[in-house]
Amino acid sequence: MLQTLKTYFGYDSFRPLQENIIRHILAKKDSLVLMPTGGGKSICYQLPAILSDGTTVVVSPLISLMKDQVESLQANGIYARAMNSANNETENLILRKECLEGKVKLLYISPERLLMEMNFLLKDMKISLFAIDEAHCISQWGHDFRPEYTQLKSIREQFPQVPIVALTATADKITREDIIKQLDLKEPEVFISSFDRPNLNLTVKRGFQQKDKTRAILEFIKQHPGECGIIYCMSRDKTEKVAEMLEKYGITTTVYHAGLNAKARDKAQDDFINDRVQVVCATIAFGMGIDKSNVRWVIHYNMPKSIESFYQEIGRAGRDGLKSDTLLFYSLGDLVMLSKFAIDSGQQDINLEKLNRMQQYAESDICRRRILLNYFGENMEHDCGNCDVCRNPPERFDGSIIVQKALSAIARTNQQIGTRMLVAILRGNYFQELTEKGYDKLKTFGAGRDVPQQDWMDYLLQMLNMGYIEVAYNENNHLKITPSGVKVLYGQEKAMLVVIKREEKTPNKGKKKKAEKESKPMFNAITLSDEGMDKELFEELRVLRKRLADEQGIPPYIILTDKTLHLIAIQRPTTLEAFGMVSGIGEYKKEKYGKVFVEAIRNFLQ
């Protein structure tokens, strides 16, 4: 096993649980594997495929994901193929012949195609294992349920002797039980890896309006020069607006959402994977189909609907284990919109509960990583030190008067207003609807003029999460005072609010040059500047890798990951043997790329 791991994948040792899972699969037993994105799930079935007699059939939901996996395996000298609608009939004929001859070690196939081939090609092949990737798609409780996955139980009926391994990066307890039931797994061993991704820096920004988000995003990207990232948005329209904004500032960007035709989506994904653009602005439709290892950051423009969705999406950053940043924007508007979606979803109770847990994460004043791990049933006994709460623990103050002003305004309007109208009353802003209803005559009109509008939105969010108010989604999102709120309103209890800390505004364009020297970055720049690494050499090797990738028409990270390139820049191998000793370089890559990289390093050192 270790020799195969080194020969094909270039690693000297297994990650936690990998060896146990592989031994279990080789013993022909069923299993369910939960590992975070970038945790090494694929090797758990790819290595047994190499060691077993026959073909491993991998069920995968997306063509782009299959393409990525197949290219990575082929780059390691492993005979892998994909059968899906992207193939023409000639390609499929050749592929069928290779499968029947036993040449193919891993066959990637969509669930629909698998069902079509169940009584034809698959029946005549020697199959060593079925691997169900993205297995959460099979469960109605999963965050990305796909109806076509529900018929996969027929694998067990047609191939009772072939072991099945189901793999996913995110599944809570109810989803895990459903996966086992839906696939009819026989006495499966459930392997749950640690969900901790300590390389991910977690930050939440609350109550930002569009202008503030734009400023924060530009500052954030500035700290990641030339590094790829994803911005997730709630709507198609928002992805396009954010992309337009970034292009104005000279940041190469593409968009990805379900409203585009297949050709446009494929081009967007291809441009991002091949480093032709720095940023992709996308809805949640994007991402499951990529194994791109050098995504250095992920921004959520809006709050996701569940912790599972959020965890999987931030997991697309730092798959190679190097430091990466994540940023989540969270507002009252997001909460209102997502609550409506949950109520209309047909699974109201469970979706509202999942949203509630996501909200608790975003609002937390304790270590965010502990909340994430706790959600997946894993306890961490210490704070992580790599989230915004750990770096800047919140300060509280007695905000009773602020809360009383807001509650009083709600009460005086008979609890018939939403947040926008409430803030307008408190700030003393005149507009037609407000004056028509006589709200400018209220005692509280203008009572909160001294508090900026953005701060009011933040305080209202805090009040909502502290249980002083609630939103009546069935009454046009009107605000209602809770029993807890009544106690604060009448001075029976204090309201301890969190002190709002704002970053300094980015200086005006006219002062740009001077300001760039003086302004402090909002976020710590995440770099690859480990001790002993020559940045100039790393950049030269990165250019060489891109040239080789372009020549072969494959993404650069398939040739060598950033992490491996990073190690090469530290170790500076000047012989083929030394090059092959670098972690992540197997025999095939040593023979294929060793000479050109060693020559480049020698030239650099001379």
Image (cartoon, helix red, strand yellow):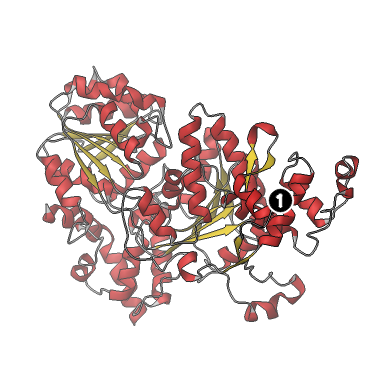
**Is 451 located above or below residue 36 in the figure?**
below
| Residue shown at 41% from the left, 71% from the top | 528
Q: Tell me the quarter of the picture where residue 28 sits.
A: top left
Specify the quadrant that holds the C terminus.
bottom left
Mark 1 — residue?
407
| Residue shown at 36% from the left, 31% from the top | 139
Q: Is residue 568 left or right of residue 332?
A: left
| Residue shown at 45% from the left, 64% from the top | 387
Q: Nearer the viewer, residue 237 or 112?
A: 237
Q: Nearer the viewer, residue 232 or 336?
A: 336
Q: Tell me the quarter of the picture where residue 99 sits.
A: top left
* Classed neighbour count for the residue bearing mark 1: other residues with Cα under 10 Å, few (<14), some (14–19), many (≥20): many
Q: Indicate the position of residue 309 as horizontal and vertical percent values.
A: 45, 44
The secondary element bearing badge 1 is classed as: helix
Q: Is residue 88 left or right of residue 278?
A: left
Q: Is residue 259 visible?
A: no
Q: Is residue 490 visible?
A: yes
Q: Nearer the viewer, residue 208 or 291?
A: 208
Q: Indicate the position of residue 60 as horizontal and vertical percent values.
A: 34, 35
